[in-house]
Image (spheres, coloured by chain):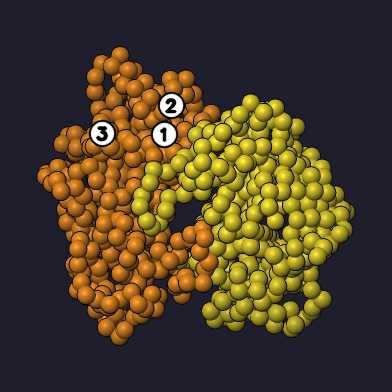
Amino acid sequence: MAPLVSIEGLSVAFNGVPVLRGVDLALGKGEALGLVGESGSGKSVTWLAALGLLPRHAKISGSVRLDGREILGAPASELDQVRGGRVAMIFQDPASALNPVLTIRKQLCEALVLHRDLSGEAVKAEALRLLNLVGIPDATRRLSAYPHEFSGGQVQRIMIAMALAGNPDLLIADEPTTALDATIQAQILELLSTIRREMSMAMVLISHDLGVVAENCDRVAVMYAGRIVEQAPANQLFADPVHPYAQGLIGALPPLDGPRRRLTAIPGTVPDPAHMPDGCAFAPRCALAAEPCRLAVPTLAPIADDRTVACIRAEASRRALLGIAAE
Amino acid sequence: MSAPLVEVSSISRSYSMRSGMFGRSTAVHAVDAVSLSIPKGETLGLVGESGSGKSTTGRVVLGLEPPDRGEVCFGGKPMAAPGTQAWRAQRARMQMIFQDPLGALDRRLPVATQIREPLDIHGLGTPAEREDRARELLRAVELTPAHGARYPGALSGGQRQRIVLARALATKPDFLVCDEPVSALDVSIQAQVVNLLADLQAQLGLTLVFISHDLRVVRQISNIVAVMYLGRIVEIGSADDLFARPEHPYTQALVSASPAPGRRSASRIVLAGDPPNPAARPSGCAFHPRCPRAIARCASEVPTLSLVGGDRQVACHLVTGPQAETRDAA
């Protein structure tokens, strides 16, 4: 099956400092892909670059194809059809994404007029349908309310309604629940997965929370310092992570049940993008790093069906995890 | 179990809030009759959603604000009135760590100077001794004197939180209140700081109150956990047991809402409704409008915290006695 979106060799530099260093990613129709990594790893920049949402001074290279059509560097008129239409995006801070002085009806209708061939009463009816779809109680009356009259979870629901206005094939959710309380996070994630099933929409879920990604995605890509270091089906990644960084991330997560153990913290910090180490960017923090790691940047190579990892010590790391002494 | 270092007996704290320019002012009960007892050297975890009163509880326990009712005893003695000499002496023995280290540090001072500041304020030791102590503290939080010469802006988030921790430890406190200390940090850095905090606690015999919305981190570091909802404790018990067998419907929902790798969301309890508004507290059990198991009694009668077996206390009409069969509904 031809992928819905395929990203190849996507690189981004701000003022000569590379922040994205060759990202390859493909996404099928209706698939839920999770993107995890620490702050600064390039999770958000990947999609902002793909949709042409970065400031002008960002230097972008590579290729981003939507249904086979190149959209990287496409003219604004074409991108306007893609953004909000075929690909919608929701962000962490929904309150700042809405206009505080316009009613919800105005903002929803604006999105509908832009992306759907609707006019007059049909727009209003569709706005009401969307608000009902995302579970805002008393939607008829609430359409004339302003953003501040809604709670944080409801504002995120409204953002989701706006994102759905264009009937997108792909929804990019960038940390959609990070600012919300645990029980509200559960509501929003449930809403997203219901909508995704009903509309057979693909989704990219960007999150720093491994648990959120594991529960809501089919496939997960782990990013580190502007690259993808491991890609695998969600259940396999969490049961058997191969890249030492992926192992570290999972080991750093305190368990909620069973015996308590000391957390395996990854030593050091994420490298400064302006002073990237030679070779593998993770080598300075990696317990398994050897001399060859510092020579060349490892490429993403397949290790099993549907699994790729960028680590020349992948075998050793797998053995270390199984408790067999490496070498 | 050793004698409690901190004994909190039914503290309440309310603020007045006015809705709109001409609206009547209403009292918001941020904390309502909370009692806690924290044994020396142990950690009490406080969990709950925003507006549940966890931070206010932390501030009252620390004497940063006086309670409207109730009393906080520290080391067997009641907290002195704020601003007095006795209060200052007590305050040197207790410190607080906040979520945002950048906001807690002065951007225009080298961090080593800021670590020394509490010693200057409380007049502890000679200037040379204070310098030595600052260097020793930097080592204790696994940083070098070179880090101490830097400004907060030149340090990473994890390093800044270590500086805040070092500063909090400067006066050799017995008691530390940590309010969401790792929430702003990335997972791998969060693990470093949690491990460091656990090590320092073991070395120095610190007593901690650890406030967080992250159940995993709370379990990792706490001996006892109290779950708060709208200013009240709804469940309290030993950390491992509480998360393994939550009894209160709210705790059950919280535990089930915490995403876990390797589990699909099918079995999750999704609560209806929004997080509660402290200014419009529901009658009876504050949780009843969102509770999947609420009965008529819940809307009229406030449940009290009572022992249900072991060291577990639950405030719920539906959870009674040690034999209560409450989990099958979950």
Closer-to-camera residue (A143/A203): A203
Please determine whether, in this image, residue B82 is positioned above or below residue B289: above
- Please, what is the three-letter code of the amino acid marked with disc 2? Leu
Q: Which chain is orange?
A: B
Same chain, marks 3 and 1?
Answer: yes
- Please, what is the three-letter code of the amino acid marked with disc 1? Arg
Residue B264: % across, % down: 53, 66
Local secondary structure at mark 2? loop
Local secondary structure at mark 1? helix
Which residue has dot 3 on it? Answer: B204
Closer-to-camera residue (A232/A112): A232
Question: Is A205 on the left or on the right of A65, as rendered?
Answer: left
How far, Cα to Cα, is label 3 from label 1? 16 Å
Q: Residue at x 25, y 70 (%)?
A: B315
- Please, what is the three-letter code of the amino acid marked with disc 3? Leu
Which residue has dot 1 on it? Answer: B162
Which of the marked residues, 3 or 1, is nearer the chain's N terminus?
1
Rate crowding at label 3 as few (under 14), some (14 to 19) or many (20 or more) other CA atoms within 10 Å.
few
Q: Mark 3 lies on which chain?
A: B
Which of the marked residues, 3 or 2, is nearer the chain's N terminus?
2
Q: Which residue is drawn at 77% across and 45% down?
A: A10
Query: Is the residue under label 1 in contact with that under label 2 (CB below 8 Å)?
Result: yes
Question: Is B39 on the left or on the right of A238, as rendered?
Answer: left
Q: Can residue B221 be spotted in the picture?
A: yes
Q: Quadrant of the N terminus of chain A?
A: bottom right
How far, Cα to Cα, is label 3 from label 2? 18 Å
